[in-house]
Amino acid sequence: MLEVSFGTPQKKPTFAPKLLYLLGLVSLFLLPALGRLTLAHLFFTIFALYLISWLVSAKLVMPFLSFLKKNRLFALLALLYFISTSIAAVKEKNPMGLLASLMFLGVFWGAAVVYFMEEQGQNTLFLFFLRGFCHSAVVTSFILLVDVWLYRTSGKILLQYLPTFLTTPAGEHVLINTDHPLAPYLSFWHPLRPAAFSWDPGLNIPALVIAFVVINEGLLIMKYNRLVRFFLLLGIFLSFSKTSVIACLAYLLLKGIFFVLRHKEKAQSFMERWFPLLLFLFLFHIGFFFAYEALPMTYSRHLKYLGSVVYLVKTSVWDILFGFGYRRTGYFLLNHVPWFQQDKQFDPYADIESLLTNVFLWGGAMGSLFWLYSYVKAYMGSKRQERLLLLVIMFLSFGYNFHTVWFLFFYLSFLWHQLKREEPQSGV
């Protein structure tokens, strides 16, 4: 069975490793794009077609269905989540929400087939995506550095040299973003909040943190390890993404705590076992200690999103059970959350800027069972290195919504490997 502490990939005579590597490599490039079609969407579609042809030509459709039957609880909860979000999208006449539900189901199926292929003998297949993903994070860091230099020398960034039709998916987002809290104090350096090939650093900079943890914890072996880690840290801090910077610092602090407790087994065991619950409760309650007007809007809003889930009790039984679907949680915020009533600028057909909040709202009580079960099961079956990664993902998902192809494929593939472990494992 493949462990998540992957090591170094082995070469396999198949197109799957190359396609997976390319999928990982382009995964953080949200721009350039044609409409809403990104390079990640394109390469995942090509990869999905390849998987279908492989299952059919190798006469493995029935064995794959048997594989899903062996993992029926995980698969059924994913199907329940898809159904609940789809029902909500149809009810709200929200075609974009339905497309997002289909994207989730497609990526879940793709991650399942990849794991199935590994069980057929290609036991390092996911590594190729992971390596491409980490290379994409390094390229993103390089682009951030180039953007800072370009902005200082010409007042432009790299995306502005591309044709406008390839950057229009940014919509109302400005490509040059100078909205960060330290800008007044760093004007001597640069007032830019770069996002590389994206319109907002919240969509791709969290991936740099995840890549840094993956490499720093030895979950993937790469050449020039120290240089790569330094470059990723440089990109994280150059982006001025508050969530990503704080998550990175929190990860380093947690590493320090585990190091201090390395000779105190009981304290360390308690921390490892119960820290996810403690962290969730902290993130859930922190927003109640701040009035919406007490902090700048973007700060208090992000702090208060998760706690606003309690206002589900003000909605209908249907909404509590099945949620609001993708691209509709803004409606919940505008119509049911008292502290947000004064701010009517939020799009009702947009999602709240917090992935951790959205998992309870997209599919309601029924759909959220998938995320709760999979996270707890995976965490309890992980080693310390992987537990740190899962904690970082929780922290990142609190601060922004990066429900994208790169996150779904990374996280669902990770879950497939972790859920196969039957007993909790402590760190090494």
Image (cartoon, rainbow, N blue to C red):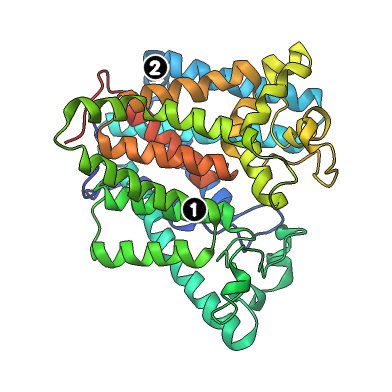
Per the image, label 1 sits on a secondary structure element best described as helix
Give left or right: position of 173 versus 5: right
Q: Relative to the observer, which residue lies in front, 237 or 295?
A: 295
Which residue lies most toward the bottom here?
153
Q: Does dot 2 land on a helix, a strand or a loop?
A: loop
Q: Can residue 53 be seen in this view?
A: no
Could you tell me residue 211's position as x and y percent? 38, 52
Q: Is residue 364 left or right of residue 67?
A: right
User: Badge 1, how many Cα within 10 Å: few under 14, some, many 20+?
Assistant: many
Residue 71 image label: 2
Residue 157 percent across, percent down from the top left: 61, 76
- Residue 332 place in picture, x, y as percent: 77, 30
For image coordinates 73% across by 16% down, the residue present is: 313
**Residue 157: assigned label:** none
Label 2 environment density (alpha carbons within 10 Å; few <14, some 14–19, many ≥20): some
Type of residue at label 2?
A: Asn
Q: Mark 1 points at which residue?
A: 244
Asked if residue 181 can be seen in this view, the reply is yes
Q: Residue at x 49, y 22 (%)?
A: 372
Q: In which quarter of the image is the C terminus?
A: top left
Number of callouts in the render?
A: 2
The amino acid on which the numbered mark 1 sits, given as a three-letter code, is Ser
Closer-to-camera residue (74/150) = 150
- In the image, 302 versus 18, the foreground residue is 302
Question: In front: mark 1 or mark 2?
Answer: 1
